[in-house]
Image: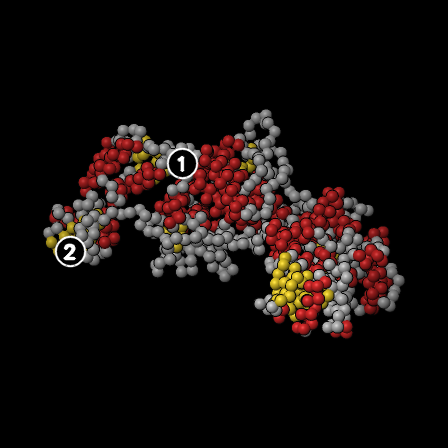
Amino acid sequence: MSTEEKSAAPRSLAEALRVRDDVSLAALLRSRPDLVTPVPTDLTQLATRAGTRASVVRALERLDRFTLQTAEALAVAADPAPYGELLRLMAGDPAVAADPAVAAALPRSLALLREQALVWGADDRLRLVRTARELLAPSPQHPSPTGLGPSVREATAGMSPGRMQELLAAAGLPSTHDSVSAVSALGALFTDRPRMEALLAGLPEESRQVLARLVWGPPYGQVTHDPAAHLRALLDRGLLLPTAPGTVVLPREVALHLRGGRAHRAPEPVPPPVEAAAAHRPQVVDATAAGQALAALATVEELLKEWDEGGPAVLRAGGLSVRDLKRTAVALDVPEPVAAFWVELAYGAGLIASDGEADERYAATPAGDEWRELPTAERWARLAEAWLTATRTPGVVGGRDAKDRTLSALGPNLDRSAAPEVRRRVLGLLAGLPEGASPTEESVLARLRWERPPRGPQREQREPREPREPREEDLRSRLARWTLSEAELLGVTGRGALAAPGRALIGAPEPLRPAPPTGEPEGPGDKLPVHHRALPSTTPPTPAEQAAATASAARLLAPLFPEPLDHVLLQADLTAVAPGPLERPLADLLGVLADVESKGGATVYRFTPGSVRRALDAGRTAADLHAVLARHSRTPVPQPLTYLIDDVARRHGRLRVGAASAYVRCDDDTTLDEILADKRAAGLGLRRLAPTVLAAQADPAALLEGLRAMGFAPAAESAAGDVLIARADAHRTPPRTAPEPVPDGPPVPDDTLLTAAIRAVRAGDLASTAPRKPGPGAAGGGGPAAGELPRTGAAETLATMQAAVLTGEALWIGYVNAEGAASQRVVAPIRVEGGFVTAYDHTADEVRTYPLHRITGVAELADGAT
């Protein structure tokens, strides 16, 4: 570089940011939203914030695998490094073999690192941000994923001059009394390919085998106090360097020579494709998804009905007990993990919550009643949106938290902030396949691991086709597996393929239709070609955009649902078959009058004495039940069902149970004699008070249950002697809001905020870097240094302001606001009166008024500064 070019090159990240345009700064703040919260005062503060450890770690965690590999290569390169050196580290030494795919993809990854302010400088002087270098550079405490060790300079930092001379002599290099020159000479030897080949050729085969075992890492090994001859040959030539007693390391330069110049064993410049495992007709996928959606709605409704009169108790630490979750799973006829999913989904949609009473229990909310009255497609859309945006993760139920406590459904510590982003990304990958294609699970997981590689031991160097050692999956992979299964349960997908409503739910573009097939593949073995296409944006949508997408999904789903039926088929075996979804009033009646025996495309209800009694307890009469069944049955009402209703109704209410502790009243004293003679009544503590009245020690609820277990049909009565009607909606929580998702870091700023933030940063940078005129108020007769607030007296401040009003010149001021925060501003005074100055503020790009007593000082700008 010429002297002029060197002087023009940025000397810091702040200078590199200063030469960016507004579009580039907006891209930086959009990709790293933590930098704009709060808005930096100037570009120097922005650069400082971009180099903090927390911000850099967050940025590195959001890089794809190849971009992260590029950053790791820069961490082991010289600082600064030319682009050619980075290319050799990524693609390999051209003298050996270079990977053209890596060379083609490297400019993109480098541009991404520059955009996110992790790399700055021109191509001939690339610099990785210091914090990123510290995080990614190899060290004994934190090995690099590259598997490289320290450089020769780092490994020989504490070596004695005498030992250095021995290494030079053994390597055939001229001796020197300068340790720095000795290290440089040894490093130059290791980076000179012909001389290194000659040096390695003179080693015994056992020595070369040792180097082969260390070349891809870990680069550290153990030696005894008296090493074997083949190890001594390596130590004498500096090919292995001691780092601690009994520990040696392979220098970075030697490892790179043996690797052919590559920093990574397997660079991955291209994301792995999502493979299609099977294809189905889109109509089949949509129909299957619609069936799953109906089943999902039925399951959630059944959960609300199960907890209608008050659900399980809330644990002291919050959540459901294991026993209550098992009971709920039995009631819903699903496995416990699936029951946890439905419970959490209803909770996330605001349909169930805790009642907040002293004896706290879970119950349906008023919003749950409103939800049940919505059209079918809208009910599904509300559940789907709640699932897509929720951070609560039912998949972790049953696991352990950091304090080794069991994670319970509806309990604390279930939030995983990455869940919404992973769900949206998985569905986006499915949207990138041809319409009706279902993916292989492993290809989806491989793609997600490339987009966000897990940090830690899972990123160790390995052969391209080397099997992964079994270890616990990273969180994103588990979230992806749960997403695929939950989407199928909810009806977002059908047969593993994304359905049209699910595509609309994430705002995906129109589906990609495959070429006309020669046959209709339907089996899992029918492979489809891999298609590459634009996928939905990974940027989270705004609430308005998501609401519009949800409404669109509901519109697409509505025609796929069958029309609700107003009839059932009554059968002689005391069952009723509903050949499809029923209208709400009929479904509610059958839910009370009969028990669900089986579900599916058609629901089978069974009438029993207990179910009929339940309808009578709810205030129905036998005549009502006969009339309703006759009106809604497409078949004649079977005689056994008529007899069942009449028989239960005839016995219903003959016994009356009220509150004393409790009592039993019956006009037929022989029935009371029968109860007293029954051994099963011993636990109720009954005794006769009158020929038609029995007193009991049990409470009314227990007495009702005991008598029903004995085969009677008692009815509860009030203090006035009226029959009490049991209502299905006996218990509701107060109004509750659905749980808010836990944000995964600061929200991405919108265009309005970005524009305002960039304008403020630019203006603040102008205020802090604009040259000042020398003034008498500054020490030594010069103006204040950049970044230093001006200090002038009140009289001088007032005089300078008044003069600027007359001349129209801009001034640089120091200002302290009412909260005590100091800032620098460039203003053009317009009017000074009443202890206030009105001026055009270049920082805020608007006219503002400032109290003079809060201005700490003022200085004139140099000519041409604005």
- Badge 1 amino acid: Gly
Q: Is residue 155 above or below residue 466?
A: below
Q: Is residue 851 left or right of residue 82?
A: left
Residue 265 coordinates in the image, percent (x, y): 71, 49
Tell me what residue is drawn at x 80 percent, y 46 percent.
Answer: 94
Q: Nearer the viewer, residue 348 or 104?
A: 348
Q: Is residue 188 above or below residue 713?
A: below
The part of the image, by quadrant, that contains residue 744 is bottom right
Mark 1 lies on a secondary structure that is loop
Residue 783 coordinates in the image, percent (x, y): 75, 69
Mark 2 lies on a secondary structure that is strand
- Quarter in which the C terminus is drawn: bottom right
Q: Is residue 612 visible?
A: yes
Q: Is residue 192 left or right of residue 708?
A: right
Q: Which residue is mark 2?
A: 687
Residue 641 coordinates in the image, percent (x, y): 25, 34
- Badge 2 amino acid: Arg
Tell me what residue is drawn at x 28 percent, y 47 percent.
Answer: 727
